[in-house]
Image: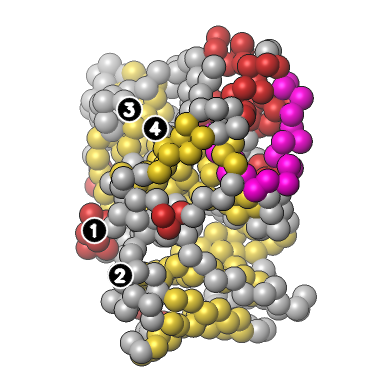
Amino acid sequence: MSVNLLRIGAALGVVVMSAALVPVQPAAANITRIQISACPKGISIQVVEEDLNLPAPQVSFNIQPSGPGASANLVGSTTNDVPGGVGRLFVYWNEVALTPGAKGDVIARGARNESYASFIVDAECPPLGSVRGSAFEDLNRNGVRDPGEPGIGTASWKLTAGGDWFICGVVGGDSTFGPTVLPGTYSVIPIAQPGWLATTPPRTALVRQLGFASLSNDIGFVRAPGARGDICGQYAPAPAPPQPLPPLPSQDAAAILTAFGSFNTLLLAAEVAGVRDIFSAPGPYIFLAPTDVAFDRVPPTTLNRLLNDPNRSSRVLRSHIIPGVIDATAIGARGRTFRTLGGRTVTLRVRNGVLYANNAVVGEIAPASNGAVFVIDRVLFIN
């Protein structure tokens, strides 16, 4: 991966979540899933392999009428944690010109089997992925953003994919950062400015697919008068620990939220309101799901009132649920507005290659048997 791969980001403006799923292979197979997103600027391929001891799958693709793809040019990244079992996710990207409407197929050859999936090249490209987080003053020096710890509007960060590729930058006035990247595995490293020391170790961000955002990559610092600060280029890439895959689409939203492990406050609010079964309702619904980190951004007194008031909790939850199905391919820069079960309105739009729900960044979109879960990084309505 090189720096020039980021230059196509400015041209991307429509979210497309196209994927072709291969049927689950027999029990003895080592490749269990392929997902594909293809557009005029390239192809993104995900392959799940269930056995950690086997070599990486060999992936190739063919396009008609454009001709065969070159598997040697596929850039890949891996992770070692698949919920419900052992496995690895391989995310491949090939920046190659493809013809809109062209048909193609992907073959992934593993040590014990090969899997096949077909696809059609979309007319427009989705946004690239993004890695998003914020800088905070780590008052208790534990490296984790706890309730009440303030943001820092002048902190620095580094993002690297390994080798000599990296980006360095300064957070915005609201303490956040969010560079646009291709699918892959990245290390997020805090860079201390003079008078500060970093407390958060390098962390791993996985952008699994085009259009997805890796959220909550917060980096902590403590005041240290006299500290000279860090230099961006002095840091080598950090090793990449395992990252979880999203649950399979056959589960309902309740099972998906539980499996992710990042929605404990949301599920607690549902229990307080006595409506936890709403996530298993037939639907279809779009469940806008704030992460635990999103709830951590709510003032503690406001959050306490929410978690001790069943009526308020029910009202907030219903304000994050949109009835019906939303076609992500229809969302562009002009946006579309939807009404929630709570009577509030939510506008989905693409800004700078990122999908937003009102002022919240949409991370992953997990298909569910009763709709879909849209992971968001802020609580949209708290009253």
Residue on which the image places disc 3: 175
Which residue is the site of mark 4? 359
**Residue 75 against residue 231 in the figure, above or below:** below
Question: Real-space Cα distance between discs 2 and 4?
Answer: 28 Å
The residue that disc 1 covers is 11
> Distance between the Cα atoms at labels 4 and 3?
15 Å
Front position among marks 3 and 2: 2
Q: Position of residue 197 (x, y in %)?
A: 34, 27
Was residue 277 drawn as part of the magenta stretch in this picture? Answer: yes
Circle nearer the N terminus (1, 4)? 1
Camera-nearest residue between 131 and 1: 131
The question of residue 200 being in magenta is answered with no
Q: Label 2 near label 3: C-beta < 8 Å?
A: no
Determine the image quadrant of residue 181: bottom left
Give the mark, 3 or 1, whose residue is nearer the N terminus. Answer: 1
**Foreground of the two, 267 or 14:** 14
Gap in angstroms between the C-alphas marked 1 and 2: 10 Å
**At x 60% / y 32%, what residue is drawn?**
341
Q: Are marks 1 and 2 in contact (CB under 8 Å)?
A: yes
Sequence-earlier tag: 3 or 2: 2
- Residue found 68% across the figure and 16% down from its top: 311
Magenta stretch, residue numbers: 272-291
Please tell me which of labels 2 and 4 falls first in the chain: 2
- Say what secondary structure mark 3 lies in: loop
Mark 2, Cα crowd under 10 Å, few <14 / some 14-19 / many 20+, is some
Q: Type of residue at label 3?
A: Ser
Q: Residues within 10 Å of mark 1 (few under 14, many from 20)?
A: some
Q: CA distance from mark 1 to mark 4?
A: 22 Å
SS category of the residue bearing label 4: loop
Secondary structure state at the residue bearing disc 2: loop
- Circles 4 and 3, Cβ within 8 Å, touching? The answer is no
Residue denoted by label 2: 41
